[in-house]
Image (cartoon, coloured by chain):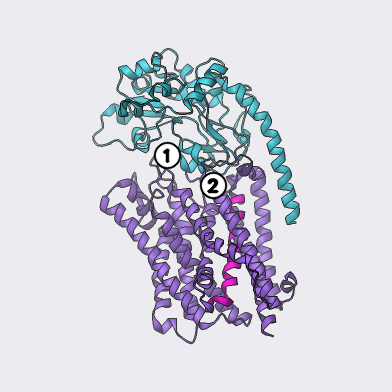
Amino acid sequence: MFEKALKGNSYYWMWLAFLGALMSIAAICYLRQYNYGLGLTGMSRDVSWGLYISQFTFLVGVAAGGVMLVLPYYIHDYKAFGKITILGEFLAIAALLMCLTFIVADLGQPLRMLNVIIHAQPGSMLFYDMIVLNGYLFLNILCGWVILTSERKGIHPPKWIYFFVYLSIPFAVSIHTVTAMLYCGLPGRHFWLSAIVAPRFLASAFAAGPALIVVVALILRRVANFDAGKEAINKMVTIIIYAALINVFFVGLEFFVGFYSNIPGHKHTLQYLFFGLEHHGHIYNNLVPFMKAFVLLFVVGIGLISLPYTRYNKNDIWLGLGCAAIFISFWLDKGVGFVLGGFVPTPLEEVVEYYPAANEIFITIGIWAMGAFILTVLYKIAISVEHEIEA
Amino acid sequence: MDKKRRDFLKIAGVSTLAGLGGTSVIGQMLSGSTPAEAGAAKEVSGHGNEHAPAAHGSNPHGSVAKSGKRLGMVIDLRKFRENPHLGEKVVEACHSTHNVPDFPNKKDEIKWTWLTEYEKAFTEHSHYYKDHSTLDHEVLVMCNHCDNPPCVRACPTRATFKNKEGIVAMDYHRCIGCRFCMAACPYGMRSFNWRDPRAGLDMNTINTRFPTRMRGVVEKCNFCAERVGIGKQPACVEACGSSKALVFGNLNDPNSEIRKVLKANYTIQRKPSLGTHPSVFYIV
């Protein structure tokens, strides 16, 4: 089916060329990092994870979000999702490939990465994360490909594939749960040491993933003559609204626990992220604009996708903007604030702020471009098959 | 392209495996355990929780738990206050013994042991109305060599591990540089080689008896496993001379000097509420 990706109009090729250019820049930047070391990033012994791991964390959620299409379609037989379930599965593939690339980009000794398998440590959460991420990637490639091939041939998918489809549902939950466990099992990092991290990750994932799919579906309607269907979009928006509200509710609970209990350790990171943390007469607040944008975009986004005037407007630009706002909002929450904020204050209660370096920003952009590239190619294939069936 | 990369990684993986064969031999030589000690440590099965048997009265494993070796240290801050230059001397001894590079840029910083304010070292203790000597003097901090180390739990490759003598050690040749251990350490005692550490060393004056590291791996205080293995005291303890500012020994041996010091003095530990059971004690 790959030949479908080789036929496209000039916009398609220009888009891929643009992404390819960003990927090339990132490749050069990565070579620099590979030769010099991670010192080319803004990370330090105090903020030892930066953009790479925060993007990884967010994208695991985007990958898991696809299950919000798979589950209603296959478990509840919700027919309206029939056409777009493949979009969820292919989004998961692209997002997971980005996740794995971000992890490799973050390793100090990438050539030794197979040590995670050779010297497998069942006590380490990273070991399980490796298993579930690769497992979920495999399941999505398998299910997406087999079902799309069957559709193309006009036959029912083979029965055995449903075993893997159903298996992919707990896997989707597990990837984000285990990713949360990377953080919430560490003693001495008060902000991360919270049982609500995993549910919060899932809620934010189930909003951000479908939000991205809605945005892409609306774009595809204009540029690729692909109609996801009114009912499907509408149902997805409902899912996004509930999941987004639950995520912000969980964030609110963190605030309650920290500020009502008045335990300094539970308040520090929240203060640092949302208001700025005063320490020895200096106020540290470099993430505050991002967190303010998170709250603002959430309010704007949830308004646009809930209020009937904008939600059901004939001009679906409002709906698209609303979903984009939710996606960016939750990216700021989890892809910026959660990971970077967790390192403030340090275990010695010092405050060290992290500023990403240009080299690592270009690598980060390049990996996102790689994901967009893979997603474009996969969606091109999926939509070409749909068109072929309709014709 | 993709295939080539995969092949490349396969080869890389196999050669790493081959390299590890060598390091484990060196590691065994460095740990210096006699077979008898190794056997004793096996019986203990890495368990050194001394409080549990006492709390439960009749723990059937109580007597066994105390027989393994568990190296620890007492840091007598009174001695450091008496001799204000001692702290710097200790840090210098450690860093020169282990070829710890000196980078002016704080972002690249690597340190195994250093002096910090009391309130930073003991974040769980009250800092209201502290006396002058506590406020004016700094505290020596280093890896706590926890009996229940979160860094070892987090490490996906066992590049960091607790050896038979209770030392939390590093295998620089196995570390993949994921820095999970740095996030896991509640004391902030681990450093990462953000760049080639040799750039921060004078290669003419390095200690040739201890390896320099490569970029991309984590390092930290190793309780001088390489010196203890050949019957020497850790470099920091040696730097204190006869002052007894640092006392090093087997915490599981009731007749050891460190146990006598612990019996005679009130000591505190860093962040005891986290259940990591540090092996480093402080006399304030």
**Residue A296 percent coordinates (x, y):** 39, 68
- Tell me which corner region of the image, top left, top right, bottom left or bottom right, holds residue B158: top right
* Residue occupying the point 41% across, 18% down: B247
The purple chain is A
- Check disc 2 and give the amino acid type: Leu
Give the side of residue A8 with respect to residue A76, left or right.
Answer: right
**Picture disc at residue B148:** none
Badge 2 density bin: few <14, some 14–19, many ≥20, Cα 10 Å: many
Residue A56 in the image: above or below residue B37: below
Q: Is residue A383 above or below residue B69?
A: below
Colour representing chain B: cyan
Q: Which residues are magenta?
A: A81-104
Q: Closest to the observer: B136 or B190?
A: B190
**Disc 1 designates what residue?**
B186
Q: Position of residue A174 (x, y in %)?
A: 50, 56
The chain ID associated with circle 1 is: B
Q: Nearer the viewer, residue A368 or A118?
A: A118
Name the residue at 44% across, 84% down. A312
Q: Secondary structure at mark 1?
A: loop
